[in-house]
Image: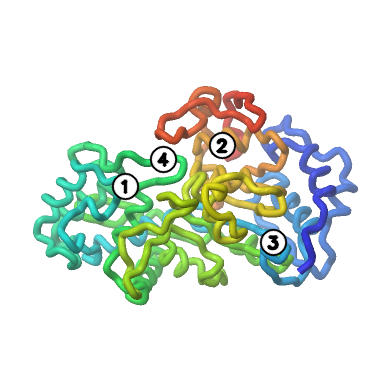
Amino acid sequence: MPARAPLSLLVAAVTALSISGCGAESPQPSDTSEKASATPAADCRTLAENPGWYGDNRDRIDAMLAELGTCGATGSATDGAPLALFDWDNTVVKNDIGDATFFWMVRNGKLRAPAGGDWSTTSPYLTPQAAAALSKACAAAEPGRPMPTDTDLGCADELVSVYTDAETRADEPAFAGFNARRFEPSYAWAAQMLAGWPESELTGFVEAARKENLAAPEGTEQKVGSGDETGWVRYYPQMRDLVETLRANGFDVRIISASAEPVVRVWAAELGFTPDKVMGVRTERDGDVLTSKLVPCGGETAIPYIEGKRCRVNEDVFGVTGSAAFEQQSEAERAAFAAGDSDTDVTFLTDATALRLVLNRNKTELMCTAYDNADGRWLVNPMFIDPKKKQDESYECATEGYIEPSGKEGPLHRADGSVVSDQQDSVS
């Protein structure tokens, strides 16, 4: 696979633009011949026409394919193929497969109580209050055995509260002491609570949850414990087409997700992703049985979450080790294209050297960064199914646009140190 083509054409196009289609005053290309010259050859795949694409987002992606792609080629990023990275939940699919799996496991009594009976072993960041609440609510469960959460609603409700709200039912914090730019404890906990199952058995559970959520009508809610939770998932046809089109143009396409890796592998197989192309939350194995011990990244307890996504990509794809995996690498060791929808995606999206596609879910740090569009490479698109309405109030980027390691919010700064001004929501 030859090295990446130069970015000259793409840079010339994107620097003439702000966020594509962001209102009537957004600048448009002044010379259409430049876009025409970027059109792929007739035998190269381009994106399907679809009204879900906003403004000229589709055209700009096609221009990138023409500039960086090699029609019909295959290869790896380590051999010079351009890398494309996708978040999974609410980016490739509508709704969250981590939620879908966790809720299915609760409804069907498949989550196991901790083997030693000590709930603090399920997460190093679980608070004593949460450990005590879970121990009390799930007292009927035998250590190491599946809990009867299909009938024990109190236990089910406590588990769901800790997972979905990061609080006990008594409104006490469930997790504490973590770096909020490298770790999201409830996401990690969903993976850690899969402990005790061989991956082959777990795969069957995930397949059952997948089938159920795909078959459910859009808008379905399911009863989990005594509460109602989202009960449906859909693949976005536009993202399926984008993944396949990138591959057809020689891109190395991979997933970087904050859901459990065994779960993402099952869902991603539908789009042709082999296990080596899927990165998610990993836990260690005892033989072939999953444990609750997280596989570290960059030498610390980190999962694919904000800076942790950069770390996983740098480790897995480019072989960067130690604390350097948290640092932005040279352009030759970064993705060309990336797509995401949430604050958890902002770092790996920022690393992309050509284009960065954002599905607008009104997430402050991500939308502040995308709308600021400091280098002209950000594309904002409404969600392809049930898009959010335009947010009336501004994103408070100058005061609350950045998630600090403590979890508090502060001003969002550009790479040059200047503060990003508040941004209006304009793509919905």
State the CA–CA distance, disc 3 to disc 1.
36 Å
Could you tell me residue 61's position as x and y percent? 72, 53
Could you tell me residue 212's position as x and y percent? 36, 67
406 versus 308 height, above or below: above
Identify the amino acid type marked 2.
Met
Disc 2 residue crowd, few under 14, some 14–19, many 20+, Cα 10 Å? many
Looking at the image, which residue is at 46% across and 41% down? 181
Disc 3 residue crowd, few under 14, some 14–19, many 20+, Cα 10 Å? few
Which residue was labeled with disc 4?
179
User: Do labels 3 and 1 touch, CB within 8 Å?
Assistant: no
Q: Is residue 418 visible?
A: yes
Identify the amino acid type marked 3.
Ala
The mark closer to the camera, 4 or 1, is: 4
Query: Foreground: 414 or 238?
Result: 414
Which residue was labeled with disc 1?
164
Which residue was labeled with disc 3?
48
Which residue was labeled with disc 2?
367
Q: Where does the C terminus fall, quadrant-wise?
A: top right
